[in-house]
Amino acid sequence: MKFSIGQLVWISSAFDGSMFCGPPAIVISAYKDYPKIFLHNEAANRHWLEEEDIGVGWVYDVLYEGRIEEAVLEEWLVPFTQKKGVENIHPQRRKE
C-alpha cells in the first residue's frame, strides 16, 4: 500500500502522468480490488480492464471535489508533496 488514509494526493492526468488534475484529493479508504473507471457500468469496466490487462491491486477511495471516487488505481495517484506541472482545469477568468 503506497498511500495512507488521510493522505493528500494528486490525481494524475490521463494524458500525461506528470500533470495533475484540479485540487488535491484525500484518501479515505485503501483495499485490494479491481479499479473502477466506469462506476455505473460493470460490463464496460470489465472490458476496459481486460483491454488494459489490469487485475486486482491496491485501489483507493478518495474524496475529490466533494464527491467520493471509488476504487482509484494506485498508479493514478501521486503524493501531494510532489508538485510538478499542475494542470489547471479551473482557469480564472480575467475581467476585460
Image (tube, grey):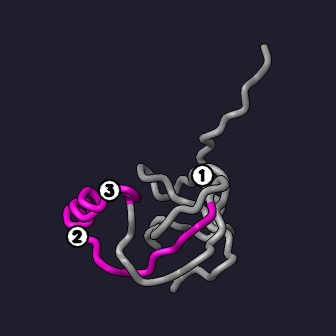
**Is-magenta flag for residue 53?**
yes
- Label 1, label 3: how far apart the Cα atoms are: 32 Å
Residue at the far bottom: name it: 1
Pointer 2 or 1: first along the chain: 2
State the image quarter where residue 50 is shown. bottom left
Residue 14 as seen in the image, left or right of residue 95: left
Q: Alpha-carbon neighbours of circle 3 within 10 Å: few (<14), some, or many (≥20)?
A: few
State the image quarter where residue 83 is shown. bottom right
Callout 2: helix, strand or loop?
A: loop
Q: Pick the residue in front: 84 or 9.
A: 9
State the image quarter where residue 54 is shown. bottom left
The amino acid type of the residue labelled 2 equals: Asp
Pointer 2 or 3: first along the chain: 3
The range drawn in magenta is 37-63
Tell me the number on the disc at residue 41.
3
**Residue at horizontal 21 percent and vertical 60 percent from the top:** 47
Residue 39 coordinates in the image, percent (x, y) = 40, 59
Kindly indicate whether the residue at mark 1 contacts the one at mark 2 (C-beta within 8 angstroms).
Answer: no
Q: Alpha-carbon neighbours of circle 2 within 10 Å: few (<14), some, or many (≥20)?
A: few
How many numbered circles does the render carry? 3
Residue 19 coordinates in the image, percent (x, y) = 54, 53
